[in-house]
Image (spheres, rainbow, N blue to C red):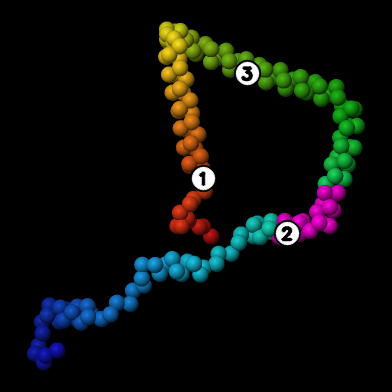
Amino acid sequence: MSHKHLGDGDRDAAVIRALSRLPSYSPGPDFSDRVMLRVRLPEPKSVALMSRAVQWAREPRRAFVLAGAYAVSAAAALVLLVPWLFQNITALQLGLDWAGGRLLAFVSQGTQAAASWTVSSGLAEWFSSLSLDGMRLAFVLAGVTAAYAGCATMLRFLLRAPRGAHATVQA
């Protein structure tokens, strides 16, 4: 720099020029990817417990013990449940008959309401006015089938696991 007196604007420009000559020490574009490759996220406790329980149960001796314990508990439940069922079969039949009657009444009322709405809205007349001969019916069925297949394909696409390298992880 020279020994003459610089104004504020000249001083700022000189500082900016000096700073621009310095080498850049910013991280490269793949810096975050290299760091994330080294990051180990801890396994959730429930997953760790489940994997330890599966490893414990995979030993043949323990697996036989678990299967035997399950069989004994199922047999004990049946030994207790079957006599109780035979003692209370009339009460169970009354309860099941009542529940079945209520369900049948609900379905009947819903069907009647849907049928009356169909007639009152004119939808029944519209359907009866449609003339679907063989070729038109085939086109309608093909369209419905294509729409169903498209919806199933899109649902499969939406529910698949993420495939990109940048899947989000919440810790």
The amino acid sitting under disc 1 is Arg
The correct choice, above or below, for 146 with respect to 165 in the image is: above
Residue wearing tag 3: 107
Residue 18 seen by the camera = yes
Residue at 51% over, 39% down: 156
Residue wearing tag 2: 55
Binning the other alpha carbons within 10 Å of mark 1 as few (below 14), some (14 to 19) or many (20 upward) gives few
State which tag comes first along the sequence, 2 or 1: 2
- SS category of the residue bearing label 2: helix
The correct choice, above or below, for 32 with respect to 17 in the image is: above
The amino acid sitting under disc 2 is Gln
Q: Distance between the residues labelled 2 and 1?
A: 28 Å
**Magenta-tinted stretch:** 52-69
Residue wearing tag 1: 160
Mark 3 or 2, which is nearer the eye?
A: 2
Q: Distance between the residues labelled 3 and 1?
A: 36 Å
Q: Are marks 3 and 1 in contact (CB under 8 Å)?
A: no
Front position in the image: 109 or 133: 133
**Place of residue 32 in the rendered image (x, y in percent of width and height, measured from the top left):** 42, 67
- SS category of the residue bearing label 1: loop
State which tag comes first along the sequence, 3 or 1: 3
Q: Is the magenta stretch mostly helix, strand or loop?
A: helix
Mark 3 or 1, which is nearer the eye?
A: 1
Q: How far apart are marks 3 and 2 (CA)?
A: 49 Å
The amino acid sitting under disc 3 is Val
Front position in the image: 58 or 90: 58
Residue 62 among those drawn in magenta: yes
Q: Are marks 3 and 2 in contact (CB under 8 Å)?
A: no
